[in-house]
Image (cartoon, rainbow, N blue to C red):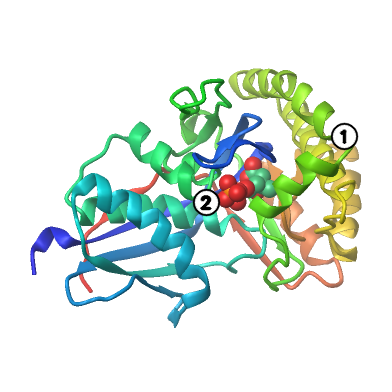
């Protein structure tokens, strides 16, 4: 077997401060709104891709288990790479997350970023970060951001071929090394996938248009807050963007309510802490976990406060991470 038919990569999850929810085009997976995120150091996916002439179909082994139900999405993604690389054989994809999968913790972001890098390397391709990011977007739009480290923006773009829909680094993590404390309130997998939820929101939520129309102002304020290291402004826009997205989700028919009671309790606890002068704000994605973004000097106080809330199953505390990287495959 040719050495270049196998490769391994690691990518980190990311948390959006200004959220992405909605698609302007399904085939290329182009978002209807831009977004800004932080790449997280402690939440990682490691993926090995092995193109193997003996296989009759693609296989996905996720966290040690064969996952035929998830392999279709992976197989569609690999088909594009096979076409570009002129390969005709199938692959075994072995992927491990060090955090709960499919529970609103951005496992598809780190997953498709790691897969894009490992699969292209295994197929003998050596892509630039911008090209990798555009490829990762086709698997999951938030994955385009996980190719980069630190603070990352993804632009909406206008062109129908998607060439102006790009993710790029806004600032290195050293610019403003914020901390993130994640309160896990349930490890169950979510019942509605993001793609299905977004299409349904665009069709049925009466707030969808306002969500899209007010987005450019949020992106611009967030860029300024990051450049000026203005935590108060970052906190205000982060919570506002999160709550606007959840208002769209909740007003979708049938409604998409991702929170549980502990999620709401944590929101109140973190709001009270900020009133006391602690540099912290919250954000939630398509799941019930609460991500507290905080100033490094306040991280242990935030962690203690979140841990003391009844119903919090686990806490993950992390700093900001680097972009996706190629790993030496020793397995
Ligand atoms: C709620 O990237 O998972 O986490 O492109 O359909 O795969 P697809 O969606 P995905 O969407 C994640 C949306 C979000 C907010 C965000 O990360 O910006």
The residue nearer to you, when weighing 129 against 1, is 1
Along the horizontal axis of the image, is 330 left or right of 219?
Answer: left
Location of residue 71 by image quarter: bottom left
Residue 288 drawn at (x, y percent):
77, 61
Image position, residue 215 (x, y; %): 73, 25
**Does the beta carbon at disc 1 come under 8 Å from ligand 1?**
no
Question: As displayed, is residue 90 above or below residue 4?
Answer: below
Does the rendering let one see residue 298?
A: no
Alpha carbons under labels 2 and 1: distance apart? 26 Å
Residue 136, quarter of picture: top left
Q: Secondary structure at mark 2?
A: helix
Lower sequence index among marks 2 and 1: 2
208 to 121, vertically: above or below: above
Q: Is residue 89 left or right of residue 2?
A: right
Front residue (pair 201, 247): 201
Q: Is residue 206 left or right of residue 158?
A: right
Disc 2, ligand 1: is the CB inside 8 Å? Answer: yes
The label on residue 109 is: 2
| The N terminus lies in quadrant | bottom left
Residue receiving disc 1: 207
Q: Quadrant of residue 315?
A: bottom right
């Amino acid at each position: 077997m040719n050495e270049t038919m196998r490769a391994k990569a690691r990518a980190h999850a990311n948390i959006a401060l200004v959220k992405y929810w909605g698609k302007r085009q399904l085939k290329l997976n182009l978002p209807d709104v831009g977004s800004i995120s932080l790449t997280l150091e402690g939440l990682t996916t490691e993926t090995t891709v092995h193109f193997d002439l003996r296989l009759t179909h693609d296989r996905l082994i996720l966290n040690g288990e064969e996952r035929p139900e998830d392999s279709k999405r992976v197989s569609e993604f690999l088909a594009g790479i096979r076409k570009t690389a002129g390969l005709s054989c199938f692959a075994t994809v072995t992927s491990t997350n060090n955090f709960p999968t499919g529970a609103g913790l951005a496992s598809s972001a780190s997953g498709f970023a790691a897969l894009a890098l490992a699969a292209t390397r295994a197929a003998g391709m050596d892509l630039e970060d911008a090209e990798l990011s555009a490829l990762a977007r086709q698997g999951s739009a938030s994955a385009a951001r996980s190719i980069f480290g630190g603070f990352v923006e993804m632009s909406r773009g206008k062109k129908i071929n998607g060439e102006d829909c790009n993710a790029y680094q806004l600032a290195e993590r050293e610019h403003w090394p914020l901390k993130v404390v994640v309160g896990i309130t349930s490890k169950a997998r979510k019942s509605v996938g993001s793609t299905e939820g977004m299409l349904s929101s665009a069709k049925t939520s009466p707030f969808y248009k306002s969500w899209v129309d007010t987005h450019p102002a949020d992106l611009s304020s967030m860029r300024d807050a990051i450049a000026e290291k203005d935590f108060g402004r970052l906190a205000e826009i982060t919570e506002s963007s999160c709550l606007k997205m959840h208002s769209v989700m909740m007003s979708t028919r049938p409604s998409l309510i991702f929170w549980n009671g502990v999620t709401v309790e944590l929101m109140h606890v973190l709001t009270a802490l900020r009133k006391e002068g602690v540099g912290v704000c919250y954000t939630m994605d398509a799941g019930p976990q609460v991500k507290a973004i905080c100033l490094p000097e306040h991280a242990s106080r935030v962690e203690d406060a979140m841990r003391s809330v009844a119903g919090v199953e686990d806490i993950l505390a992390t700093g900001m991470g680097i972009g996706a990287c190629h790993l030496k495959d020793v397995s």
